[in-house]
Every structure is written in structure tokens, then in C-alpha cells.
Image: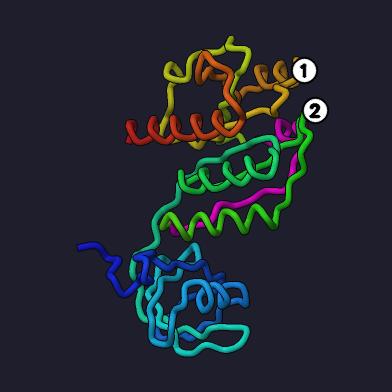
Amino acid sequence: MSSYSTHFTNQRGKVIRLYVERPFLENQEISLSENQSHYVQKVMRLKQNDELLVFNGTEGEWKAIIRTHLKKTTELTLLYQNRPQESPNNLWLLFSPLKPKRQEFLEEKATELGVSCLMPIQFEHTTCKVNGEKMRAHVIEAAEQCKRLTIPEIKPLLPFSDLLRSWPEDRSLLFGDETLTSLPVKNVEIDSRKFYGFLVGPEGGFTSQELTLLKSHPKAQGVVLNHNILRSETAALAGISYLQIAVQKET
């Protein structure tokens, strides 16, 4: 029997999960933010003594009960831990900022796939801006919907040159090579004991200088994902999915 009982659902059968950024203790009373309270009261129409699920990214998922509705908040009482905290993936996704709708799609799907860190990179052909607050809101909503217990870390926009200078020694970097001159991704050896990041370039592609710097970096490895040229969000999700599958096969 699933740990998600019918008590956790609204009239449409949807599981209500909320990310609450504070420590959890049994029988602790917590207050929802104004936006969360509006969602619970006006959108989902939960009432006093209705139950829902909450998580904070570090202490698992908890069952909570609504004690009272106030004008700008909703008061909950934590009952017990419903699911223990899981060890998150340690997989980074690096990308050039995209147009808003495509960016939101990428953030949502990367969260669903378990990416631990989203890192926007400024390339020479990057034309779009990035909004860290909106990114965080999108990944929280995605985590709430997909039953994930952690929230991806969101890094500030980083120039490409700084990325290579500061790249950690204990992490390998795969990047999608749109010139199709690198190894097919299926031929790249993946070691489950190592950490990985996957990088996709901007819509206009890497410059020749950027590609040269990537190919000469000791921790970077170009890969060919498909013989067709993929859009940035497609390439990002394909690369992340491959890495996850390859690591799972090794463990």
C-alpha cells in the first residue's frame, strides 16, 4: 500500500506537498507563507484538520495537519515523518540562459530528473538574462509536484572563462559537441564513483575559442548526443538522462 493515503489529496485526487524552509520536529507548529496559504485556502480549498505533506530538503517528508486558517497565513502542526531523507544525486547541469518559457521547461524537467545544481553560464553567444528568484520558485514548484525531497542549488550567472578556471578537480565535465567531432556519448566511460557535470552551449553554439578551451581542459570531455543538432533544452535533458542511466548501471 502506498504511503500516500487518500487523506493527502483534494477532491481531484492531487497530492498536496509544500516546501517549507525551516527545521522540523514532531508536534511542531509552523506557519505557511502568504502565497502558500493562498494556494492551500483558495486554490486547493483545504479546511481545518485536513492533512498535507511538507518537506524542507534535509529532513525527509512529513505529514502535517491544518490547525487554523488566518488571513495571511495557515497554521500547521507536524505529525510525523512520512518518508526519510534520501541521498541526493550529485549531478550538475550547466547551460546558457534560454528564453523564459524554454528556461522554465528546462528547470522543471531538470528538477524532475534529480539534478543537484543548476549553473547558468555566460557565453559569447548568450543573449538571454537569468532571474535567480524565478528559477528558485520554478524548481521548488517542480520538486513539490514530482515528490522530490530536495531542491536543486541555483548558482549565479558565471562567465565561461571563470567556469573553466574554477572547475573542481574531483568532478568531470561532459559537454554537448554540436560539431559532431567528439565521441558518441554511448562510448564514453562513466565511473559511478566520480562526480559529473553536463554542459550545453548557447543557441548560437560555442565559439571556436570556447570549443578549443573546452577540448583542452583536463576535466572536460565532448560528447555527441545525436547526429541531429539538438536544441539546448533537449541536449541538456538527454545528457543528464544518459549520465544517470550510466551511473546506475555501474552501481
Going by the numbered disc 2, the residue's amino acid type is Glu
Which residue is identified by label 1? Answer: 209
Residue located at (74% from left, 44% from top):
157
Image location (x, y in percent) of residue 183? 51, 13
Quarter occupied by residue 203: top right
Q: Is residue 68 left or right of residue 52?
A: right
Mark 1 or mark 2: which comes first in sequence? Answer: 2
Nearest the camera: 29 or 86? 29
Image location (x, y in percent) of residue 142? 51, 54
Q: Is residue 51 left or right of residue 177?
A: left
- If the image is split into quadrants, where does the N terminus sit? bottom left
The answer to whether the residues at label 1 and label 2 have Cβ atoms under 8 Å apart is yes
Label 1 to label 2, Cα distance in Å? Answer: 10 Å
Image location (x, y in percent) of residue 175? 59, 25
**Label 2, residues with CA under 10 Å away: few <14, some 14-19, many ≥20:** some
Q: Secondary structure at mark 2?
A: loop
Above or below 191: residue 133: below
Nearest the camera: 47 or 150? 47
Q: Is residue 154 magenta?
A: yes
Q: Which residues are magenta?
A: 148-167
Which residue is identified by label 2? Answer: 124
